Image (cartoon, rainbow, N blue to C red):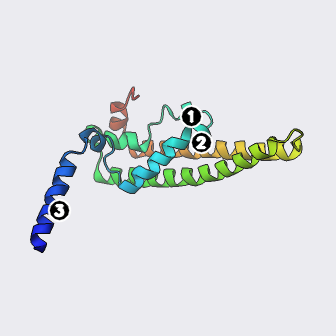
Amino acid sequence: MTKVVLAFTGCLLAIFLAGAPESLADSQPYTSPDMMKKLALFRNKVGAVFILPQSLGPHPGASYILSRARELGLTPSQIARIRSIRRRMVTRSLRQFERIDRLRARYLSLMESRNPPLPEGRRLFMHLTRLMARATFDHLAGHVAVGKVLTEAQWKKLAGHP
């Protein structure tokens, strides 16, 4: 009976995985389910946190590079290094986003008053924008670190990336 249940479960799993959209699997190779969750959280928050996100443009991110791993001819060592950089970047960014969200809430609460304490408001605002700038720059540094993993030939293949 146990063998039948295991076989049936295996068949269901194979059917389920075969029916999974290929584009999702292709677009996010080398990404664990845990990292997919973190990336979703990151992408949900990034627009409200980063200052001058267009500075990231010339520096493709880890997920983009990993999605083109086969085309770029990345080695297993390069893939492992890029995954490690991405893990550090996303984990750090999510921690920074939490701090920024807490500080933003404090600032907005303080400023709701008809006569807010401006010196305290200014102090919170300056701290908030400094944290936002640090989060942006730390993430940019991660993109640059990913770029350093690539060879010149791989960079040339990326010319004109979106």
Q: Amino acid at mark 3?
A: Thr
Q: Amino acid at mark 1?
A: Pro
- Decide which of tag 1 and tag 3 comes sooner along the chain: 3
Q: Looking at the image, is 6 positioned above or below residue 126?
A: below
Q: Count neighbours of disc 2 (C-alpha within 10 A) and say few if under 14, some if 14 to 19, many if 20 or more.
A: many
For this view, does 111 lie left or right of residue 73? right
- On the image, numbered disc 1 is attached to which residue? 53
- On the image, numbered disc 3 is attached to which residue? 9
- Decide which of tag 1 and tag 2 comes sooner along the chain: 1
Mark 3 or mark 2: which is in front? Answer: 3
Task: Give me the C-alpha separation between circle 1 and circle 3.
Answer: 46 Å
The location of residue 80, given as percent across then percent down, is: 35, 55
| Quarter of the image where the N terminus is located | bottom left
Question: Do the numbered discs 1 and 2 sit on residues whose CB atoms are within 8 Å?
Answer: yes
Residue at 13%, 73% (x, y): give it.
2
For this view, does 138 lie left or right of residue 58? right
For this view, does 14 lie left or right of residue 155? left
Q: Find numbered disc 2 in the image and state the secondary structure of the residue it sits on.
A: helix
The location of residue 92, given as percent across then percent down, is: 55, 54
- On the image, numbered disc 2 is attached to which residue? 136
Mark 1 or mark 3: which is in front? Answer: 3
